[in-house]
Amino acid sequence: MAFVLVGLTTRALAQPNVLRTLYGMMYGVVCFAILFSFTGTVLGGLWADVSWGRFWGWDPKENGALLIVLVNALALHARWGGIVKQRGFAVLCLLGNIVTAWSWFGTNQMGIGLHSYGRMDGATLWLSVFWLSQIALIGLGLLPLRWWRSFAQAAEGTSA
């Protein structure tokens, strides 16, 4: 989120060390997230096998856990394959925020499945507000670079 906001409003991203630092932090967080999400999903499946006699039941909460792993894997593979650069990786990380919020809170609001617990009054509103904020940031992140203040001013400075 910071990547998109800083890029649109300041010249800070034109400085290579700031860009490199933000990108490195995003990459580290996604690596950490996929490691622990995958481990937690597998351990949850092993626990379910012992407790309920099945490893996977396609419950909404289980599917949410799988989606978190898949979105993080998508972001990492897109980065490793050179499909996305810094800005594209930031947008994929924002998509990961939406998926994680849905997996943690949205499935509880559905009221179905074995893991449907903790329904909260008003949570749907706040979850929707969060989603809209992330979608807005994704939209801003997809704007052409010439509209980004940091890159536009950097280009003007080099052409003059």
Image (cartoon, rainbow, N blue to C red):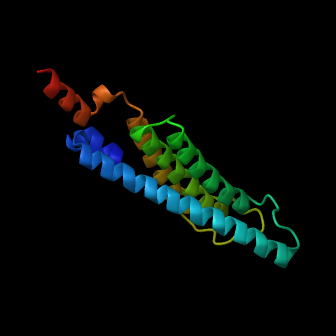
Disc count in the image? 0
Residue 9's spot in the image, x, y percent? 24, 41
> What residue do we see at 78% from left, 68% from top?
114
Residue lying at the far right in this picture: please name it: 53
Residue 99's spot in the image, x, y percent? 58, 52
Q: Is residue 146 left or right of residue 116?
A: left
Residue lying at the far left in this picture: please name it: 160
Residue 73's spot in the image, x, y percent? 60, 49
- 76 and 139: which one is in front? 76
Residue lying at the far top in this picture: please name it: 159
| Quadrant of res 77 | top right
**For residue 44, above or below residue 130:** below
**For residue 157, above or below residue 52:** above
Can see residue 145? yes
Residue lying at the far bottom in this picture: please name it: 51
Can see residue 2? no
- 85 and 112: which one is in front? 85
